[in-house]
Image: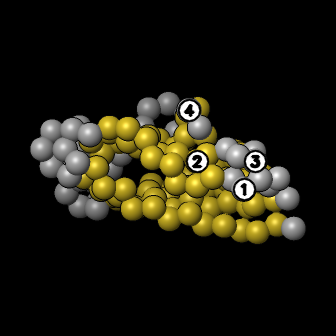
Amino acid sequence: MKNVISVAYHLSVSGGASGTVSIYSVPGARKLKLKSIRVSFPAGTYSELKIALMRGIEKIFPVEGEVRGDNEVVEAEVDEELSSGSTLRIAYENTNATQTRECEILITGVLDE
């Protein structure tokens, strides 16, 4: 049985903060095949918020650097697989020391048995 899933996450990062946040854990005896990622940065972000998609501690998107933007949407096809018990995470860093920066993240994939 296959199920298309979407994981939506609103990321809000305080000034100068960095870290990771878990946004989805693959259920037992299942696999998640990632298909796409969409990141929407609002106007006024000034490319100061940097993010990357992680499989546990391994960066899977982008291959090099981070995703950032200002008043734009970054979309990409992704071809990665997460096994049972794996965690999908977002690594983030706000390079502005005082202002909160945010973005909207939408990840789609197929959950297989």
Of the pair 107 and 63, the residue shown nearer to us? 107
Q: CA distance from mark 4 to mark 3?
A: 16 Å
What label does residue 98 carry, if any? none
**Could you tell me residue 1's position as x and y percent?**
87, 68
Question: Colour mode?
Answer: secondary structure
The residue that disc 4 covers is 57
**Could you tell me residue 106's position as x and y percent?**
51, 62
Classify residue 109 by image quadrant.
Answer: bottom right
Q: Is residue 73 visible?
A: no
Q: Nearer the viewer, mark 4 or mark 1?
A: 1
The residue that disc 2 covers is 88
Q: Residues within 10 Å of mark 1 (few under 14, many from 20)?
A: some
Q: Could you tell which of marks 4 and 3 lies nearer the N-terminus?
A: 4
What label does residue 27 carry, if any? 1
**Above or below, 78 relative to 62:** below
Q: CA distance from mark 4 to mark 2?
A: 9 Å
Tag 3 secondary structure: loop
Q: Could you tell which of marks 4 and 2 lies nearer the N-terminus?
A: 4
**Above or below, 42 relative to 66:** below
Q: Could you tell which of marks 3 and 1 lies nearer the N-terminus?
A: 1
Q: CA distance from mark 4 to mark 1?
A: 18 Å
Left or right? Give the position of 97 relative to 107.
left
- Going by the numbered disc 4, the residue's amino acid type is Ile
Residue at the image position 32 percent from the left and 37 percent from the top: 18
Classify residue 83 by image quadrant.
Answer: top right
Left or right? Give the position of 82 relative to 72.
right
The residue that disc 3 covers is 84
Q: CA distance from mark 2 to mark 1?
A: 12 Å
**Above or below, 64 relative to 98:** above
Q: Could you tell which of marks 4 and 1 lies nearer the N-terminus?
A: 1
